[in-house]
Image: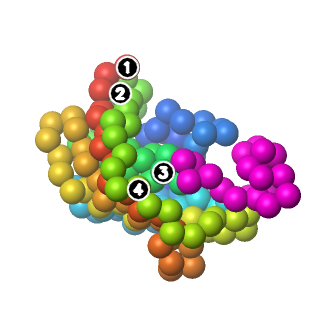
Amino acid sequence: MIYNVVEIQKILPHRFPFLLVDRITELETGKFIKGYKNVSISEPIFQGHFPDHPIYPGVMILEGMAQTGGVLAFKSMGEMTAEELESKVVYFMSIDKAKFRAPVTPGDKLEYLITIMKNKGAVWQFEAKAYVDGKVVAQAELKAMIVDK
């Protein structure tokens, strides 16, 4: 384990019910990050998606990949103080080539692998994949920017 959920909250501004990464397990600054989210039936999203056939929404998978990429971007910028981290936020700019390969259901461990494709200044482009039991369930190219709040 590299970062647990408490440490992730020191990096990202997201909070329940919208913090969608539980743990970072591997990180190589400037290259890639691995993390995961445990999908639980107790999550509010399952009240409406769908009550009798719970499927974790693809948009939530994309957001979880983006949040994991945000941790990678922040950590790849070099050491920042807590005050510097608090003064910045990561904005999602685009999603390209998104594909959903298989449904994600309660009880699944949703594993994220995010790789940096390009970085220019505050703009980051990532290749993102999500897995369940080693099988790709979603993938996309994501672009984000780190800005002052």
x%, y% of residue 31? 24, 61
N-terminal-most mark, 3 or 4:
3
- Badge 1 is on which residue? 149
Cβ atoms at labels 4 and 2 below 8 Å apart: no
User: How far, Cα to Cα, is label 2 from label 1?
Assistant: 5 Å
x%, y% of residue 138? 48, 63
Mark in front: 1 vs 3: 3
Q: Tell me which amino acid carries mark 2.
A: Lys
Tally of marks: 4
User: How far, Cα to Cα, is label 2 from label 3?
Assistant: 21 Å
- Seen from the viewer's position, the closer of residues 135 and 40 is 135
Cβ atoms at labels 3 and 4 below 8 Å apart: yes
In the rendered view, does 140 fall on the left or right side of 23? left
- Badge 4 is on which residue? 98
Cβ atoms at labels 2 and 1 below 8 Å apart: yes
Mark in front: 4 vs 2: 4
- Badge 2 is on which residue? 88
Mark in front: 1 vs 4: 4
Q: Tell me which amino acid carries mark 3.
A: Leu
Q: Tell me which amino acid carries mark 4.
A: Ala
**Mark 3 element type:** helix
Queried whether the magenta region covers residue 72, the answer comes back as: no
The answer to whether residue 42 is visible is no
| Residue range corresponding to the magenta coloring | 40-60
